[in-house]
Image (tube, rainbow, N blue to C red):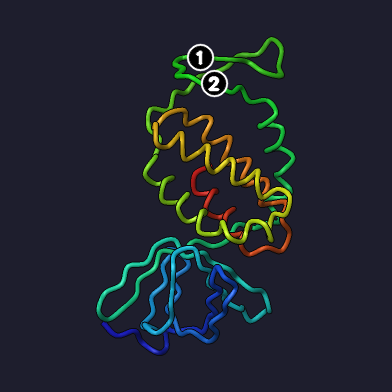
Amino acid sequence: MRLLFRDLISVNLVKMNGEIYEGIKVNLQSQVNKLLTQEFNIPFEEGDFIERKLKNGVIEKYVILKINQSSNVINMDIQKNTDLTADEKNMGEQQKIINNTNNFYDKVTGVQIQQGTNNSSQEQTVMQEFDYDKLTKILEQIKKYDSTFDNEYGEKAPEIRSKIDEIETLLQKRENPSRIKILLTDIKNLSIGVAGSLIASGIISLVSAIV
């Protein structure tokens, strides 16, 4: 397979350690979250970022989720970074949800609890499936950023590490999806509070795939 020159654009690769590779030729298919390249000399890794500068000066950022490499092409699954401005607008509502959450630390089935409303009805939906395997892969990618947490999150670094450790424990037991989602939302909200950080933006994008 040979990529056509007319389909290629120039992007930058921003690695987790801050190293930048500029002018990489790729076929970026944002509509299907794919990126193809034959730049085999570039050390792409899952969790790295792709930056694309548009004609209007706006920089689009994508996080690399998965890399599939053959003998003649590198095929990557990518995800566009969450719009932080939109996340900040929703942060207040998300925090309200967290504050009104009941935490169950054992297996619970068929429970309905009405909160914050009077004389109202409630429909119950019981989710039977939770993609533990997908979350395990996402958590592995988030943990790649661990060495940067102290610089990026400051005094909140121990808190985000603690939440990651608790999620790992729940994943190993494959239980309590509700608690896992609460912890993921906490991590997302902590990341939203880190303005201008590529690392935090990447974590937001990864977590948004689950919650």
**Callout 2, which amino acid?**
Phe
Q: At 54% from the left edge and 48% from the top edge, which residue is drawn?
A: 207
Q: Is residue 188 left or right of residue 118?
A: left
Residue type (three-letter) at the residue carrying disc 1: Val
- From the viewer's perspective, is residue 17 above or below residue 207? below
As drawn, 94 above or below 193: above
Tag of residue 104:
2
Instruction: Give me the C-alpha separation between circle 1 and circle 2.
Output: 10 Å
Give the class, few, some or many, for how many residues have Cα within 10 Å of label 2's Cα (few <14, many ≥20).
Answer: few
The image position of residue 90, as x and y in percent, is 70, 44
Please give the residue where the numbered disc 1 appears in the rendered image. Answer: 111
Secondary structure beneath dot 1 equals loop
Q: Is residue 60 above or below residue 183?
A: below
Total label count?
A: 2
Quarter the N terminus occupies: bottom left
Measuring 49% from the left and 61% from the top, which residue is drawn there?
A: 79
Residue 44 or residue 157, whichever sits in front? 157
Residue 99, image quadrant:
top right
